[in-house]
């Protein structure tokens, strides 16, 4: 890459980080490392995808349309013509990119970056639910591995969950839908879709096999109410908001002013220009990234809820993975083909 292109990419990053003195200090300290990564990205023609939960320096390595939530990144992975995709996120996300782009080399900087939701479930669990609830479609949250997706009818993400479940119920002519593997999101979908007369079967509802995000399950109503009191976040105010992720407890969603996926929370902030102070009940790096985008909003940073899996992705590991083209994701082609059908069906569901 010629020096002026590299300089302009570094300048773009610096501009994105300038609202935070801490990030600027880190940017300056790690400038050489960032330059080497950007150089390799260009030389090897790599698409670097960055999930919303990445720390800011990692997040802003990705271009504007290459950062976001699982759904946005899945769409981006499916349409790229670049030969290598490096996924700054956890393993199930990189695996989804590989399923959507089987001819591409998909790298993850740390293959140990897992997910407490995806880990406990296998294809055998889905088959057991199918046996117990015959005729019900299975909708699987994107936070799952390929073998689980391969046994399901539709994938969904936290951006499109209710819409996909409604569609699956209609397509199968039933009002019962199996939702895998997030027990809390299953309970939240149940509440959301009650007016549609849809019953959700999810792990933990009628058995003791729970699927939970180890980050989001830690938020409680007491924590949210305490933060409301301490930071004067008045429910219903135009100037403040408490936003929660779908993976939180149902009572936490009820206490929030709004709930949704990470991208939907970001959109909420964009659509409410009078906001002055916000608390996000989700992984803490999300607030750090949004604080750079919306410097006029104060993001209450009392939380210490980091995802240990997401935090495994560091600049040093990204450089190593790019330099040596290591930690390549592979998925059995037969499983990938079946998992792809579930993802494609999700992508084809009309937006609600
Ligand atoms: S934040 Fe929760 S759902 Fe997301 S990767 Fe971490 S453990 Fe999994």
Image (cartoon, rainbow, N blue to C red):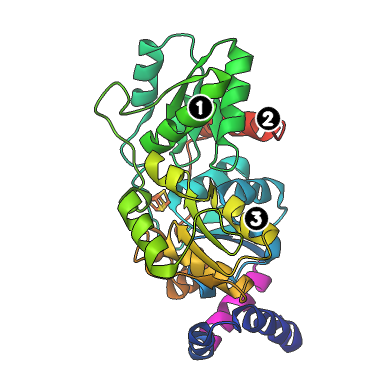
Q: CA distance from mark 1 to mark 3?
A: 25 Å
Q: CA distance from mark 2 to mark 3?
A: 21 Å
Inspect this view and state whether residue 352 appears: yes
Residue at 75% across, 87% down: 4
Residue furthest out toward the left: 208
Label 1 or label 3, whichever comes before in sequence order:
1
Residue at 57% across, 21% down: 196
Which image quadrant: the N terminus?
Answer: bottom right
Specify whether residue 36 is painted magenta.
yes
Q: Which residue is mark 2?
A: 349
Q: What percent of the width, then of the height, locates residue 237?
A: 57, 58
Label 3 neighbour load within 10 Å: few <14, some 14-19, many 20+? few
Is the residue under label 3 in contact with that under label 1 (CB below 8 Å)?
Answer: no
Q: Which mark is residue 267?
A: 3
Residue at 70% across, 31% down: 348
Q: Quadrant of residue 162?
A: top right
223 to 15, vertically: above or below? above
Q: Secondary structure at mark 1?
A: strand
Q: Quadrant of residue 160?
A: top right
Q: Secondary structure at mark 3?
A: helix
**Overall secondary structure of the magenta section:** helix
Looking at this view, is 98 or 164 the one in front? 164
Q: Which residues are magenta?
A: 31-44
Label 2 or label 1, whichever comes before in sequence order:
1
273 to 197, vertically: above or below? below
Q: Which mark is residue 139?
A: 1
Label 2 or label 3, whichever comes before in sequence order:
3
Label 1 neighbour load within 10 Å: few <14, some 14-19, many 20+? many
Label 2 neighbour load within 10 Å: few <14, some 14-19, many 20+? some
Specify whether residue 52 is painted magenta.
no
Inspect this view and state whether residue 341 appears: no
């Amino acid at each position: 890459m010629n020096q002026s292109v590299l300089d302009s990419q570094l300048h773009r990053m610096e501009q994105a980080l300038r609202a935070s003195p801490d990030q600027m200090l880190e940017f300056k300290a790690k400038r050489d490392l960032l330059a080497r990564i950007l150089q390799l990205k260009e030389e090897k023609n790599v698409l670097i995808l960055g999930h919303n939960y990445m720390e800011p320096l990692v997040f802003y390595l990705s271009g504007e349309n290459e950062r976001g939530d699982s759904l946005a990144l899945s769409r981006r992975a499916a349409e790229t013509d670049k030969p290598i995709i490096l996924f700054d996120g956890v393993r199930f996300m990189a695996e989804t990119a590989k399923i959507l782009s089987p001819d591409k080399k998909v790298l993850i900087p740390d293959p140990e970056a897992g997910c407490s939701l995806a880990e406990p479930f296998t294809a055998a669990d889905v088959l057991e639910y199918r046996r117990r609830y015959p005729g019900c479609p299975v909708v699987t949250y994107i936070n799952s591995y390929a073998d689980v997706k391969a046994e399901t009818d539709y994938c969904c993400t936290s951006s499109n969950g209710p819409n996909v479940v409604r569609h699956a119920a209609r397509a199968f002519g039933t009002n019962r839908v199996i939702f895998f593997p997030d027990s809390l999101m299953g309970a939240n979908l149940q509440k959301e879709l009650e007016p549609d007369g849809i019953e959700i079967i999810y792990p933990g509802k009628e058995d003791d096999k729970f699927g939970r995000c180890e980050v989001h399950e830690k938020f409680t109503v007491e924590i949210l109410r305490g933060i409301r009191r301490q930071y004067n976040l008045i429910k219903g105010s135009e100037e403040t908001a408490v936003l929660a992720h779908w993976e939180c407890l149902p009572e936490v969603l009820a206490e929030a002013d709004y709930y949704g996926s990470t991208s939907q929370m970001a959109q909420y902030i964009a659509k409410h220009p009078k906001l002055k102070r916000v608390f996000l009940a989700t992984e803490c790096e999300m607030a750090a990234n949004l604080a750079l985008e919306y410097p006029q909003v104060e993001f209450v940073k009392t939380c210490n809820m980091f995802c240990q899996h997401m935090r495994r992705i560091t600049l040093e590991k990204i450089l190593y993975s790019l330099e040596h083209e290591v930690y390549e994701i592979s998925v059995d082609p037969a499983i990938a083909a079946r998992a792809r059908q579930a993802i494609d069906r999700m992508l084809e569901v009309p937006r609600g």
